[in-house]
Amino acid sequence: MNQLELKLKNEGMSLAASANREWLERARQIARTLTSAHGEVTIDDVRARWIYSIPFGNWAGSVFKGGEFVCVGYQETEHKGSHGRIIKVWTLRDSHNSNSNAV
C-alpha cells in the first residue's frame, strides 16, 4: 500500500470511528473484558459477543487503535464474511508490558 492509499485508509477509518463513537467504545469495552479474562483478543472474539442492533461496519477497524492494545500475533479469521483473511491478536498494553518485564 502506497502512502496516499494509507493516508486515505486512515482518514476513512477516523471518519467512520468518529461517527460511531458510542459503538466503538462498547466494542473496546468488550475487548478489554475479554483480554482481562483470556489474555488475548481478536476482532472475531469481539464480534462473537456483540449483542447490539448496529452491525459491525467500517468503524470496527478502529477498535484496537489508539495505543491501549498491542498486537501479539496473527491468525486466520473465523468470520465467514472475512474470507479467511489474516487478523491480528491483541492484548492490553499494560498486560504486555508486565509480561515482558517478568521474563
Image: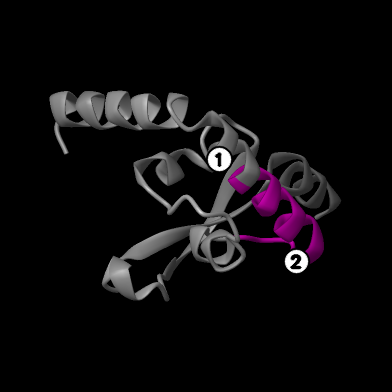
Image vertical order of residue 91 relative to residue 44, above or below? above
Image-based side of 3 in relation to 32, left or right: left
Q: Secondary structure at mark 1?
A: helix
**Could you say which quadrant of the image residue 49 lies in?**
bottom right
Picture quarter with the N terminus: top left
**Could you say which quadrant of the image residue 64 lies in?**
top right
Query: Is residue 37 a member of the stretch shown in magenta?
Result: yes
Picture quarter with the C terminus: bottom right
Residue 36 drawn at (x, y percent)? 79, 56
Categorize mark 1 by other alpha carbons within 10 Å: few (<14), some (14-19), many (20+).
some
Query: Is residue 48 a member of the stretch shown in magenta?
Result: no
Image-based side of 48 in relation to 54, left or right: right
Asked if the residues shown at circle 2 and circle 1 are in contact, with their CB atoms under 8 angstroms apart, the answer is no
The secondary structure that dominates the magenta segment is helix
> Which mark lies nearer to you, 2 or 1?
1
Q: Residue at x 68, y 53 (%)?
A: 30
Image vertical order of residue 93 relative to residue 18, above or below? below
Q: Secondary structure at mark 2?
A: helix
Q: Residue at x 59, y 31 (%)?
A: 67
Q: Which mark is residue 38?
A: 2
**Could you say which quadrant of the image residue 26 lies in?**
top right
Residue 40 drawn at (x, y percent)? 66, 61
> In this figure, which residue is indicated by the disc labeled 1?
23
Image-based side of 85 in relation to 56, left or right: left
Q: Residue at x 44, y 45 (%)?
A: 60
Q: Which mark is residue 13?
A: none
Name the amino acid, label 1.
Answer: Trp
Q: CA distance from mark 2 to mark 1?
A: 22 Å
Q: Which residues are magenta?
A: 27-41
Name the amino acid, label 2.
Answer: His
Q: How does the figure colour the protein chain or chains?
A: one colour
Image-based side of 22 in relation to 7, left or right: right
